Amino acid sequence: MMQRATKTSRNRGGSGSEKEVALESYNVTAKYYDAAYATKQDLVDLPFYLDLAKASGGPVLEIACGTGRVLLPIARENIDIDGVDNSLPMLRVLKSHIDNEPAEIRRRITLHEGDMRDFRLREKFPLVIIPFRPLQHMYTLQDQLRALATAAFHLQKNGILAFDLFYPKMELISAGVGQEIVDLEWQANSNSVVRRYFRKDSVDKINQVFSFTFIFRTYKGDKLVHQESEPFKLSYYSYPQLKALFRLARLEPVAEYGSFAKTPLDNTAEQMIFLLKKS
Ligand SMILES: C[S@@+](CC[C@H](N)C(=O)[O-])C[C@H]1O[C@@H](n2cnc3c(N)ncnc32)[C@H](O)[C@@H]1O
């Protein structure tokens, strides 16, 4: 069921420790991911990606598929889908979901452990998607370009690459370093609640990367009974930077939107959403 994707030869022999760290990413978050994002009211991307998948007819490749938040609904539309992620904890959660699906859905899904900077599958796809900002886990221009090259490599002729990033509101990015805020809360079971806290730790404005920590606190009534945390980094992109990256990756925009309701990508944008094809 789960395969290890092959890599481009350029990266063979790379640092073992770097790989080790990558495999552990989302280790804590994987346990909470589905419950957390089920409560996130402004996460409204699913109809957008489902429509693209249906229009393509499949098969679809989802890069950085996580726990299957988008992958599973696509498979349930009877569309074949390959999912790739480099986090074994996230893939394990997805595998447990897949095991609960009927056989006709299970056989639509192929999972691969791989890094978006260098994995290579044999198949090409009419649609490649990277939903919910995984490209913001690429922290250098080189890695951003490698990830786009991976996506482009897997496109069929006239295939579409679709992905979203957050629209960087510079005043928010700089604000609130060191402050803990509760950003999501959900009922874990009949007598406990989990609150996810977000703490921005630092902002590197030169490289456009900020570091933060998610802290998951479980409460029974007012009593804190469990706490665990995980550090993350996210990059943010400017629009001209993206246009330059697309050119370098030989991709050209087919459409761009500022929200999943397909509003224009302008000063009111909440997201930066792109559909691209090979140029
Ligand atoms: C915010 S989650 C999005 C998951 C899923 N696409 C969704 O919409 O719920 C980001 C995902 O990117 C994955 N990821 C981060 N860096 C990666 C890399 N270098 N290669 C592959 N996946 C990566 C993480 O493991 C995580 O599953």
Image: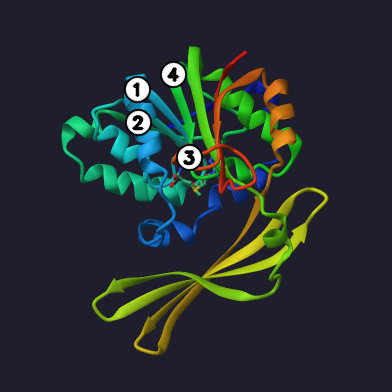
Which of the marked residues, 1 or 3, is nearer the chain's N terminus?
Answer: 1
What percent of the width, then of the height, locates residue 168?
Answer: 66, 50
What label sits on residue 131 in the rendered view?
3
How much space separates mark 2 and mark 3, taking CA atoms?
A: 13 Å
Q: Amino acid at mark 2?
A: Asp
Element type where label 1 sits in the image:
helix
Which of discs 1 and 3 lies nearer the camera? The answer is 1
Determine which of the numbered discs, if any, sits on residue 39 in the image. none
Q: Is 172 left, or right, of 100 in this rendering?
A: right
Q: Nearer the viewer, mark 2 or mark 3?
A: 2
How many C-alpha atoms fall within 10 Å of the one at disc 2: few (<14), some, or many (≥20)? few
With 228 as the anchor, is 150 left or right in this view? right
Check contact, mark 1 vs mark 3: CB within 8 A.
Answer: no
Look at mark 4 in the image and give the residue it sits on. Answer: 125
Disc 4 from disc 2: Cα separation: 16 Å
Residue annotated with mark 2: 51
Label 1 – label 3 distance at C-alpha = 17 Å
Evaluate if marks 4 and 2 touch, with contact meaning CB atoms under 8 Å apart.
no
Mark 2 Cβ and ligand 1 under 8 Å apart: no
- The percent coordinates of residue 231 (x first, y second) are 61, 62
Classify mark 4: residues with Cα within 10 Å, few (<14), some (14-19) or many (20+): many
The Cα–Cα distance between marks 3 and 4, rounded to whole angstroms, is: 16 Å
Which residue position is annotated with label 1?
55
> As rendered, which of 178 and 213 lies closer to the eye?
178
